[in-house]
């Protein structure tokens, strides 16, 4: 005997809900290439003289606020450490993702095997990996050159010799480049204010979305 219409409708509704919940979290499905919504304001860079690889640019404060990621932007937050600067960066990234309706997943690095954690993030094939935590710098310097198709944004630190797929955002007090390497400023945990960390993720993403990659974005004017 055929089931009543109401029962069929209920089962169909349940199936639709289950499918809908799963589809939004399924990164195995193709999606449009991300793009920048909005434009960079005057003073981010000189359009007539784009920055060279590994160059440092000092954008005018707020020149990045008009840029937003397109719908469905997939981001992996790769984080290591529980110190206050890292926590401030993680909070800023999560707040930004919520405000911009970004599809965000988090990978917390194994302190004993960070390379495996980085490989996990790479295997998720996001549009962007955002790295937060000084403990990730040396492992990223080792792994990133072998994955040139993956865009990586480092906030609050930088790679000493970044490849074209690695962009960094830092400032005086946040220029760690790896163990045994000199930095352009003395490390200062108090420089990781909420305002500066929020600006770092927005300025960095604005640079990546505008193909200004492989550079250091310096936010010392905040």
Image: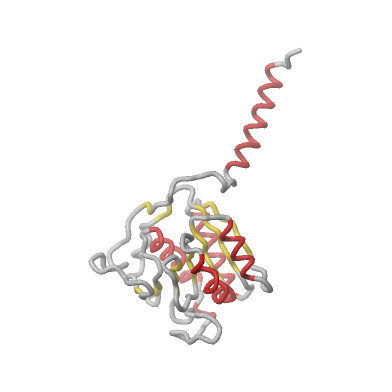
**72 is higher (above) or lower (below) than 201:** above
Residue at position x 33%, y 64% in the image:
63
Front-most of residues 73 and 98? 73
Q: Residue furthest right?
A: 1
Residue at position x 46%, y 60% in the image:
149
- Residue 182 spot, x, y in % from top left: 48, 87
**133 is higher (above) or lower (below) than 20:** below
Q: Quadrant of residue 53?
A: bottom left
- Residue 107 spot, x, y in % from top left: 62, 62
Colour scheme of this structure image?
secondary structure
Front-most of residues 210 and 102? 210
Numbered label tally: 0
Q: Quadrant of residue 45?
A: bottom left
**29 is higher (above) or lower (below) than 205:** above
Q: Is residue 45 left or right of residue 54?
A: left
Q: Quadrant of the N terminus?
A: top right
């Amino acid at each position: 005997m055929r089931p009543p219409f109401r029962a069929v409708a209920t089962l169909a509704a349940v199936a639709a809900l289950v499918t809908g919940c799963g589809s939004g979290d399924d990164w195995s499905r193709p999606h449009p290439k991300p793009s920048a919504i909005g434009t960079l304001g005057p003073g981010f860079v000189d359009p007539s003289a784009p920055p060279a690889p590994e160059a440092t640019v000092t954008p005018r404060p707020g020149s990045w606020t008009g840029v937003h990621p397109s719908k469905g932007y997939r981001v992996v937050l790769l984080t290591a450490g529980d110190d206050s600067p890292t926590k401030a960066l993680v909070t800023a990234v999560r707040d930004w993702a919520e405000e911009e309706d970004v599809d965000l997943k988090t990978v917390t690095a194994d302190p004993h095997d960070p390379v495996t954690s980085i490989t996990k993030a790479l295997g998720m094939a996001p549009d962007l990996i955002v790295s937060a935590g000084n403990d990730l710098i040396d492992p990223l310097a080792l792994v990133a050159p072998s994955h040139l198709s993956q865009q990586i944004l480092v906030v609050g630190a930088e790679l000493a010799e970044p490849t074209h797929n690695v962009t960094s955002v830092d400032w005086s007090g946040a220029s760690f480049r790896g163990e045994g390497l000199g930095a352009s400023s003395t490390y200062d945990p108090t420089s990781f204010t909420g305002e500066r960390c929020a600006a770092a993720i927005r300025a960095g993403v604005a640079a990546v979305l505008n193909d200004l990659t492989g550079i250091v974005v310096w936010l010392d004017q905040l």
